[in-house]
């Protein structure tokens, strides 16, 4: 059984629509429309990523087409006004490009997207050469993993590891990515550890611990959940 994808190269799209730095405005628009993409890497040479051009970079051309921004607006939106006069990808692109390496974890890629407010990331090697592209949809592929696969990994990597003597008595049920743990264990202090480890299994949506046992605290054994 294949393991869960853990890094960007496992889920990225290797065939990437891109343009060169000299691509003209209308060529960029036509390419976006043809391939149904909202942003593209801008390349130079043999494929080094130097920027990204997106619909947001193109819109100022229309926004400022028949307007005359005042001095305050010009200062506040200097970059957009410059792009309104842009003709080539080099004029229009956002640079430096926000990128990710193929060996980055999916969590790292998701964090970059969230912090930088982008929907997709060019995937580049150590010298900036384009390897692929990863989108929000690609990162969500982990949640397509079957409940059976998730259950098997939880049993193998969490239950057998934390509770080797009690693994046969702990029931793991997964429904729509939600993992339920039921059973009796010796030390309830391990419940929080189990929950944390299960959450780390890719494809898990939530964890519902229904484990009982004895507390190893100074007050003596007591029932807990």
Image (cartoon, rainbow, N blue to C red):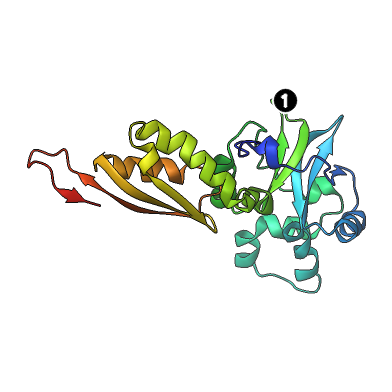
Q: Where is residue 204 in the image (x, y as percent from the top left)?
A: 51, 50
Residue at the image position 76 percent from the left and 60 percent from the top? 55
The image position of residue 151, as x and y in percent, is 52, 46
Q: Which residue lies furthest to the left in this view?
A: 219
Residue in the picture at 85% in, 57% down: 32
In the drawing, does residue 178 fall left or right of residue 188? right
Q: Mark 1 points at which residue?
A: 127
Q: Which residue lies furthest to the front in this view?
A: 168
218 or 35, nearer to the observer: 218
Check the image and name the residue furthest to the top.
127
The residue lying toward the viewer, choosing from 163 and 29, is 163
Give above or below for 129 relative to 178.
above
Q: Is residue 96 visible?
A: no
Q: Residues within 10 Å of mark 1 (few under 14, many from 20)?
A: few
User: For the residue labelled by badge 1, is the local secondary structure a helix, a strand or a loop?
Assistant: loop
Question: Which quadrant, please, contains the N terminus?
Answer: top right
Q: Can residue 221 be seen in this view?
A: yes
Quarter-wise, where is residue 176 in the image? Answer: bottom right
Compared to residue 42, the image places residue 76 above or below, namely below
Front residue of 41 and 68? 41
Q: Quadrant of residue 4?
A: top right
């Amino acid at each position: 059984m294949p393991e869960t994808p853990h890094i960007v190269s496992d889920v990225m799209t290797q065939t990437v629509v891109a343009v060169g730095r000299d691509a003209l405005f209308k060529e960029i628009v036509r390419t976006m429309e043809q391939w149904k993409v909202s942003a593209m890497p801008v390349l130079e040479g043999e494929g080094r990523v130097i920027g990204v051009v997106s619909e947001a970079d193109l819109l100022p051309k229309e926004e400022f087409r028949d307007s005359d921004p005042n001095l305050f607006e010009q200062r506040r939106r200097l970059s957009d006004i410059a792009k309104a006069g842009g003709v080539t990808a080099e004029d229009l692109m956002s640079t430096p490009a926000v990128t990710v390496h193929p060996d980055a974890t999916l969590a790292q890629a998701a964090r970059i997207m969230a912090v930088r407010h982008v929907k997709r990331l060019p995937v580049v090697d150590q010298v900036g050469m384009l390897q692929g592209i990863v989108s929000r949809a690609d990162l969500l592929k982990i949640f397509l993993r079957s409940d059976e696969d998730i259950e098997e990994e939880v049993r193998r990597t969490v239950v057998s590891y934390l509770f080797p003597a009690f693994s046969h008595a702990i029931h793991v049920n997964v429904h729509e990515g939600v993992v339920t743990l039921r059973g009796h264990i010796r030390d309830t202090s391990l419940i929080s550890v189990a929950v944390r480890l299960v959450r780390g299994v890719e494809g898990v949506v939530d964890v519902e611990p229904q484990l009982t046992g004895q507390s190893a605290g100074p007050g003596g054994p007591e029932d807990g959940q």
